[in-house]
């Protein structure tokens, strides 16, 4: 496995994003919503880097089985906090097609959120014009399968402190 983004680079970029988000949300009450499971390490570090009081919630959604997108969003757990009348920051691990983010942003807007923005750790260099593009990005990466820092392959490798590409056995 090749290291694509080092643990130190992740720490530095999360600190930068925290500063940007602190400034952006300075005068708005912020609710951070983490998309589980993959975004959990990123969301935890990012929230500590945001120098504002905030609310936190999480929920589990998926559109992947193994390394393939199913093209269908499955909600596996519910939010505890209401979305209505809140400024929402969705935190996700990786933006691939943008399908998941698009569906959630649409649904939260229909539920009465005041605003819905997104911050992703990794943005794949692919065409997102059919779906959503993120508002804040940690790193741009090529279109390859990656693991580490929350990202997995069949629930393995989430604990790696860096992002690496998983070379397919074949």
Image (tube, rainbow, N blue to C red):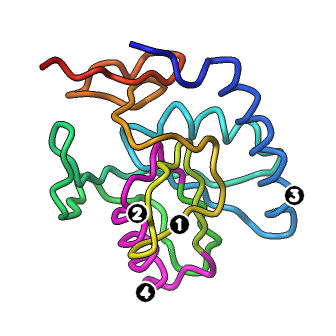
Q: Is label 4 in a helix, a strand or a loop?
A: helix
| Gap in angstroms between the C-alphas marked 1 and 3 | 21 Å
Q: Determine crowd level at label 4: few under 14, some 14-19, many 20+ residues with C-alpha closer than 10 A.
A: few
Percent across and percent down for residue 128 are: 45, 66
| Gap in angstroms between the C-alphas marked 4 and 2 | 18 Å
Q: Are marks 4 and 3 in contact (CB under 8 Å)?
A: no
Q: Does the magenta stretch include residue 58?
A: no
Q: Is label 3 in a helix, a strand or a loop?
A: helix
Q: Are marks 2 and 1 in contact (CB under 8 Å)?
A: yes
In this rendering, the label closer to the viewer, 1 or 3: 1
Residue extending furthest toward the front: 170
Q: Name the residue under label 3.
A: 23
Read off the magenta span: 91-115
| Gap in angstroms between the C-alphas marked 4 and 3 | 27 Å
Q: Determine crowd level at label 1: few under 14, some 14-19, many 20+ residues with C-alpha closer than 10 A.
A: many
Percent across and percent down for residue 10 are: 65, 27
Residue 133 numbered mark, or none:
1
Percent across and percent down for residue 21 are: 77, 54
Q: Name the residue under label 4.
A: 110
Q: Earlier in the sequence, mark 1 or mark 4?
A: 4
Does 84 sit left or right of 19 as displayed? left
């Amino acid at each position: 496995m090749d290291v694509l983004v080092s643990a130190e680079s992740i720490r530095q970029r999360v600190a930068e994003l925290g500063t940007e988000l602190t400034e952006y949300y300075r005068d708005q009450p912020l609710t951070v919503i983490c998309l589980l499971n993959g975004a959990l390490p990123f969301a935890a570090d990012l929230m500590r880097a945001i120098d504002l009081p905030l609310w936190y919630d999480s929920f589990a959604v998926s559109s992947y089985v193994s390394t393939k997108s199913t093209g269908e969003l499955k909600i596996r757990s519910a939010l505890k906090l209401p979305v209505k009348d809140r400024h929402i920051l969705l935190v996700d691990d990786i933006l691939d097609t943008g399908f998941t983010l698009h569906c959630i942003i649409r649904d939260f807007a229909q539920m009465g959120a005041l605003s819905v923005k997104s911050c992703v750790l990794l943005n794949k260099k692919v065409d997102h014009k059919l779906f959503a593009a993120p508002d804040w990005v940690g790193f741009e990466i090529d279109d390859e399968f990656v693991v580490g820092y929350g990202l997995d392959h069949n629930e393995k490798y989430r604990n790696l402190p860096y992002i690496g590409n998983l070379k397919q056995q074949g």
